[in-house]
Amino acid sequence: MRGMIQSHLLQLLTLVAMEPPLSLDAEALRDEKVKVLRSIRAISRAAVHAQACRAQYVAGRDQAGKVPGYLDETGVAHHSTTETYAALKPYIDNCRWRNVPFFIRTGKCLARNNSLIAIRFKHSL
């Protein structure tokens, strides 16, 4: 999950949240994405449970029948604590995005594969 969040989802977050770069060259794009990453608010200990979640899938059923849980998969230690699902609600502390939550979710063995960026605009007061 860390790899998926670090390499893919944060990349999408920075592309959505960055300011328009001065040019479209690689360095200008990188600079704007770095500004977004530096502006992500640290999650305090008190807010961890409200802003972050890690989990592991368990046995269940789908259209084809029974589905084993992660700990039942071949090659997985029965006491493994490796997460198979992660969700974050980061905030970006800059003028444009202050107090606007972003939602990042990823997981293995979900009911469907999905990639989605949804933006809901509201009128400013």
Image: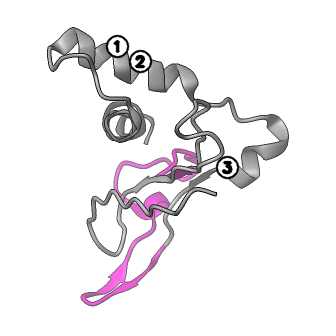
Q: Which residue is mark 3?
A: 51
Image quarter (top left, top right, bottom left or bottom right) of the N terminus:
top left
Q: Nearer the viewer, mark 2 or mark 3?
A: 2
**Viewer-closest of 49 and 118:** 118
From the viewer's perspective, is 115 left or right of 84? left
As for residue 77 lying within the magenta part, the answer is yes
Q: Residues within 10 Å of mark 3 (few under 14, many from 20)?
A: some
- Tag 1: residue type? Asp
- The magenta segment is 59-88
Q: CA distance from mark 2 to mark 3?
A: 22 Å
Q: Residue at 73%, 54% (x, y): give it.
A: 50
Where is 10 relative to 109, above or below? Answer: above
Q: Is residue 50 above or below residue 123?
A: above
How far across and down, in percent of the image, does residue 54 sit? Answer: 59, 51
Q: Is residue 58 above or below residue 66?
A: above
Which label's residue is closer to the chain start, 1 or 3?
Answer: 1
| Residue wearing tag 2 | 34
- Mark 1 vs 3: CB contact within 8 A: no
- What residue is shown with label 1? 31
Q: Nearer the viewer, residue 65 or 103?
A: 103
What amino acid is at disc 3? Gln
Secondary element at image label 2: helix
